[in-house]
């Protein structure tokens, strides 16, 4: 069988969500339909949220019946929990019955979705619930886009911001994450500057992301001010020396002209001393950065503690005195185990 025919047959039953208008137009034409059906399909997928081709009533009935096995690529909600602050955490079941978690975070002016990029996570960060559960597989682009659409449908509200801060390490799934970013921008209509991709740092991937010249925000999960401490908290840290990571970040800023955010989870007595603040300031001095200090969100597997308010504010002041842009970010959804570092893809009891 010729390669072109193999590709054509594979594409027939590949999920439609995540495909662009030109790709959907090509797909309908492969089915023997006129090109204008591509635009109809595009509108029903992205504007009306169709979950099956049988819902698309503008299509000929016989064609819909012939394509009843064609997947759209939507998940189902296995469980939903709502925190007192109105943050909603979703346990989503995928086509292969794997489970992921997604979080919808509403404020007065925006709706942010925290999406997962993998089923589980292989990074095993010591303070993170997701890493304690191991890794199963990468998500495909349509499975990432679906998370945003699911939250928008449940809130009956347009999503304004997306952060890749859920389950998984996005840069270990770089190709699909980039596809998802482009689809969220072009098909869902979310501005690239409202998209944030977070990573603990994977060797040789930040330059690849920089080469895409996207206008997204890159967030680095740093959590340590020196190499020894970083290896203690993040097992992969030994394979990506802190100074090399920062050098890659400086190069990223130079190539993209986009400021980098550094995420720093504060762990009482571990990485929150004045000396740590001074080390961090020295590390980040001299290029466009912003530090988000995140007071630790507790998980059952480890006994780290959150610093008290005075210690958190003292760390912030030390960075400010060193002319480092910094803010404190208290996570939403804490009571529903939907906060940073708490996602674990299982239903709360």
Image: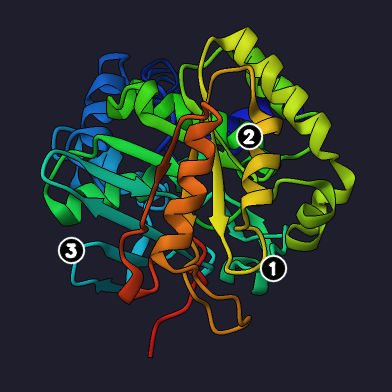
Who is closer to the viewer here, 317 or 129?
Answer: 317
Q: Position of residue 246 (x, y in %)?
A: 73, 29
Q: Position of residue 235 (x, y in %)?
A: 80, 59
Crowd band around label 2 with a 10 angstrom C-alpha radius: few (<14), some (14–19), many (20+): many
Q: Residue at x 66, y 13 (%)?
A: 211
Q: Residue at x 29, y 30 (%)?
A: 188
Who is closer to the viewer here, 216 or 16?
Answer: 216
| Residue linked to disc 1 | 126
Q: Is residue 6 visible?
A: no
Q: Residue at x 88, y 45 (%)?
A: 239
- Nearer the N terminus, badge 3 or badge 1? 3
| Residue linked to disc 3 | 86
Q: State the residue lying farthest toward the right.
A: 239
Location of the C terminus (image quadrant): bottom left
- Nearer the N terminus, badge 2 or badge 3? 3
Q: Which mark is residue 281?
A: 2
- Nearer the N terminus, badge 2 or badge 1? 1
Who is closer to the viewer here, 67 or 199?
Answer: 199
Q: Which mark is residue 91?
A: none
Element assignment for label 3: loop
Q: Is residue 329 visible?
A: yes
Element assignment for label 2: helix
């Amino acid at each position: 069988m010729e390669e072109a025919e193999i590709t054509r047959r594979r594409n027939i039953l590949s999920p439609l969500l995540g495909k662009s208008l030109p790709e959907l137009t090509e797909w309908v034409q492969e089915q023997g339909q006129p090109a204008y059906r591509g635009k109809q399909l595009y509108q029903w997928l992205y504007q009306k949220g169709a979950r099956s081709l049988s819902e698309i009533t503008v299509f000929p009935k016989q064609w819909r019946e012939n394509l009843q096995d064609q997947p759209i690529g939507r998940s189902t909600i296995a469980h939903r929990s709502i925190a007192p602050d109105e943050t909603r955490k979703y346990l989503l079941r995928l086509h292969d019955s794997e489970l992921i978690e997604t979080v919808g975070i509403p404020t007065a002016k925006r709706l942010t979705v925290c999406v997962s990029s993998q089923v589980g996570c292989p990074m095993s960060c010591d303070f993170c619930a997701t890493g304690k559960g191991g890794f199963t597989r990468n998500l495909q682009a349509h499975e990432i886009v679906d998370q945003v659409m699911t939250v928008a449908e449940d809130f009956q509200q347009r999503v304004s911001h997306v952060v890749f801060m859920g389950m998984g390490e996005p840069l270990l799934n770089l190709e699909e994450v980039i596809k998802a970013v482009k689809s969220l921008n072009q098909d869902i209509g979310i501005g690239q500057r409202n998209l944030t991709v977070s990573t603990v740092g994977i060797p040789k991937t930040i330059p690849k992301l920089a080469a895409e010249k996207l206008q997204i925000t890159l967030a680095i999960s740093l959590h340590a001010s020196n190499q020894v401490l970083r290896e203690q908290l993040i097992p992969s840290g030994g394979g990506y020396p802190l100074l090399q990571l920062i050098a890659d970040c400086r190069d990223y800023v130079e190539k993209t002209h986009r400021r980098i955010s550094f995420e720093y989870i504060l762990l009482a007595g571990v990485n929150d001393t004045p000396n740590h603040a001074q080390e961090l300031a020295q590390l980040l001095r001299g290029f466009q950065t912003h530090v988000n200090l995140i007071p630790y969100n507790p998980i059952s597997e480890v006994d780290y503690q959150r610093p008290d308010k005075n210690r958190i504010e003292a760390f912030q002041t030390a960075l400010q005195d060193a002319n480092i842009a910094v803010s404190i970010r208290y996570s939403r959804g804490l009571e529903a185990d939907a906060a940073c570092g708490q996602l674990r893809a299982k239903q709360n009891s």
